[in-house]
Image (cartoon, rainbow, N blue to C red):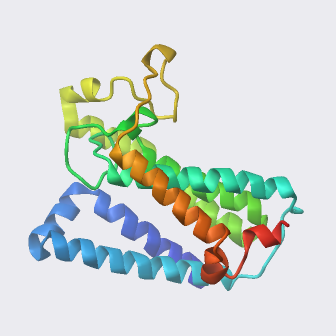
Amino acid sequence: MISFVAAFAVFLLLHSVPAIPAVRTGVISQIGKPVYLISYSVVSTAALVWLFSAALALDYVPLWDLQPWHAAVTFVLAPLGGFLVLAGVFSENPLSIAMRSSERRGAVVQVTRHPVLWGFAFWASGHIVANGDLRSLLLFGGFALFALAAIPMAEKRARRRLGGRWQALSEGTSIVPLARRPSRWRLTLDLPMLLAAALTAGISCWLLLGGGHATLFGVDPIAAFG
């Protein structure tokens, strides 16, 4: 348990500190953006591997009996979450987490102002349902709570950063997915969303039908609930 708590603490630190503009800007000014992105990706991946390894080392304590509908929930929430994360990463979004600095809005912002954070929350929540044990609740529940807790912080930072421009840029959007007023519903697609949909479909097929999930995590979800 100590290793798991330590790994989760490192994971939270790595994903919290860079969200502070002053810290991120200071590090980039010292080592350059390309080195920062590569270094951050490597360290984050290593921390994630450590976290999953520490979680798998915990004793298996079942919390509920698994039923076929549990898998169905995951088969919906996990791809949906993956799509939102990818679409959010690929899109321009001045209102939340985004890879590109711009005041243009990608089409996914019509769904929610915070697609990356909601995506992680959906993905993690789906995995809690289908595993039904204590270590999964701790691991994926921690992911989901972290993502949801980051939403009001991202909202506050965007309002402060954009000032008077926030009202216009947030027009027709919502924090909760698809919670806009019906008169504002004009859902359109753009290249980042289409690319995210294609990648999500491909990754999901590989994980579920191509043995990818079994290779990476030692569990075949379809066989487990077959």
* Residue 25: percent from left, percent from top: 16, 62
Residue at 48 percent of width and 49 percent of height: 84
Which one is in front, 123 or 163?
123
The quadrant holding residue 38 is bottom left
* Residue 60: percent from left, percent from top: 79, 78
Residue at 44 percent of width and 75 percent of height: 10
Classify the position of the N terminus by image quarter: bottom right
* Residue 173: percent from left, percent from top: 40, 28
166 to 212, vertically: above or below: above
The quadrant holding residue 207 is bottom right
Residue at 10 percent of width and 68 percent of height: 29
Q: In the picture provided, is 3 more to the left or to the right than 155?
A: right
Instruction: Answer yes or no: is residue 147 visible.
Output: no
Instruction: Answer yes or no: is residue 209 visible.
Output: yes
* Residue 69: percent from left, percent from top: 82, 52
Which one is in front, 101 or 19?
101
Q: Which residue sits furthest top? A: 183
